[in-house]
Amino acid sequence: MNIPRYVEADNDEIAQDVDAHLYGGIPKSNIDELLVLNKSVPEVINSSFEVLREGYLKLNKSMEQLMEEVINAPQVLAKNDELRKIAESFVAKYWHILRQVNLDSDLTSLMSEMLSEIKEEVSSIEFVDAYSAYQIVAEIWKDSLTKDSELIAASDFYTIGRKREPNMVTKRSGKNKRREQDGWIGMLVPNELIAKRLFASEQEEIEALKNKAQEIESELSELVEAAKVEDSEEYEALYESLKKNEDDEPQDAFEAKTIKAELKRAEKGTPEFEWLKRVEKLLADKSSTNKSIKEKEKQLKEAVESKIENLTNEEIDMLVFEKWFAGTVDALVGLVEKPLRAELSTIALLEKRYAQTFNEIDAQVSELEKAFEALASELVVVVQITMGQSPLGSNYTENPSDYILVQGNADMKNGKVFPRIWTTQVTKTAEPDDIILSVRAPVGDVGKTDYNVVLGRGVAGIKGNEFIYQLLSKMKSNSYWGKYSTGSTFDSINSNDLKEANICIPSTNEQVQIGSFFRNLDQTIAFQQRKLEKMKAMKSAYLSEMFPAEGERKPKRCFPGFTDDWEQCELGDVVRTSSFKLYLSEASGSGKYPVIQQGDNPILGFSNNKPFERFEDVVLFGDHTLSLYKPAHPFLVATDGLKILSIDGFDNNFLYSLLEKYMPES
């Protein structure tokens, strides 16, 4: 085992601070180390913190406000303007050059020239990463300029701009696999850009038809769900018209032929006739809309293919410039903010890390534990179920200002909605404190929302009390929903499954007791987890402060009466590895001595073979998993990758901490 390899390992994580965990505040030394912020916007940083006590600061504004002040600081805006001028000049220069290349041009040298120039120009601006600018331009060459410059050199810019070539596609597979032409594509100008910029109204018309088709499909889906609910008007009128599988189980669509047959049988003016007529119209509208979409898409495709050969010089300029350089200037200017945002993220991390002291968390845990007996809220069982409906994919965004979209269990963490994706389209919704249930694989995951959210097709929103939430959690743990596997690809449940779920409901008073008990228990578990995380962070801080820093002979923190310098030595020179061969053993379910393996679950089993007796003096080290284990009894080992370490004259508790201090993460 190469001990020095581990001792010398570096850890880039910001060191934990014991006093900050105990008494709160952000270490001033951590803020002082933020070089980019302190040199770029010193007045903003100085005004954003108050002294909490000597050596520790408190942020006096929200992170959002701090971010806004930094990004809009005059110094930052001036750098933005400076880099924008460089970027615009660079793009204009090479836009002209690239359009003029010919067979005498050295394209490799031209690429190198562009990469070197942008790197050199950007290097003049402090804290802007020139290599990132290099990468932005390199990506343009990779994505388009390498091929396009060769095409232009072999012809000329405007001639090649009007050239098109067959769009060859692969059809079928296996022995029947073949290549055939599917229309035409521009050799230099992409068809998609032509459609986007020159046929915008046609694209908008197609998009409107697709939205209409989605609305029709959503309405049909709702009617399908309603038709599965017994004793409803929809069930009486439409159930027989649902498609069925071989076991006569209803599927998720209507059978058009059956709808027509049922209409002939139904009496005009009756609710049954009206429901059937409504479905018939929706199916007809769906068919005609989809047909219109195909026709419009075909017309647009043909128009674009024809336009390629008739593009004007001005149109070629506009489209190729967008292909090569759209977003390039903004991407380069964004490099000014990149290091600032990285250091702002560090401030956010530090603020969150030290927001609560250990004693505050401990006090909250104590309050919750005492509250187990104080069950106080009035709860009733009222369950209103809203099945989700997915918005159009084109309306998904990453903008937190839009509506939070919950699609499935990936959007829930620790029993709460965790915003991950957003949408501009509102379909079905849930309100704060509503229960969210996953209705697609994995079925039955349950959480609550603290926000107004849009419900995707993979979830349902349930208005119910704490008892219902705990009951749904128990149903999940008992695999209740497993019997409702209705999808051939993945499990799913519908509103009918939910509404017909067999549950036992106690009296309102007992609901209060049960629901409140488990709510408080959940809160206690959550705070105990936070307490555990805080304890781990404090341990990391103590390991950092109670061992000398690199180049030092004394630790930052020590016990009273210990002031001598520590002796410096190579750990690999003093550590002793005991032979494991005599103590290798297979494990079984019974035996007197534990058999130890590497990893997070060290006890593999037990054995009655002769053990290693001097367990008090050693620490076990897993050379492959980088795990440590301090045995409490005589033991045996399961593999040769487990090293038995000791140092003469060292307490094994200290040896364990020493190894833990210098243990790399991987």
Image (cartoon, grey):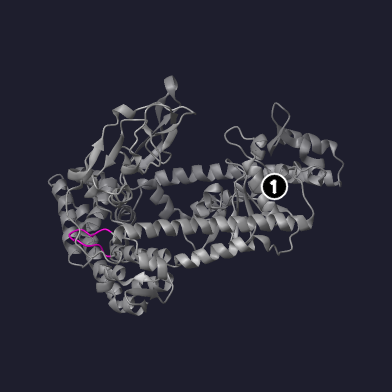
Q: Give the residues in magenta.
A: 547-556
In the image: residue 570, left or right of residue 325:
left
- Nearer to the camera, 624 or 487: 624
Look at the image and tell me whether residue 182 can be seen. yes
Which residue is located at x 49 percent, y 52 percent? Answer: 203
Which residue is located at x 35 percent, y 35 percent? Answer: 613
Look at the image and tell me whether residue 260 can be seen. no
Which quadrant of the structure image shows residue 34? bottom left
Which residue is located at x 58 percent, y 58 percent? Answer: 523
| Quarter of the figure that contains the N terminus | top left
| Quarter of the figure that contains the C terminus | top left
594 to 111, vertically: above or below = above
Which quadrant of the structure image shows residue 254? top right
Neighbour tally class for label 1: few under 14, some 14-19, many 20 plus, Cα within 10 Å = some
* Residue 565: % across, % down: 19, 61
660 to 34, vertically: above or below = above
Instruction: Give the residue number, with chain letter if any, for mark 1.
Output: 222
* Residue 101: % across, % down: 18, 50
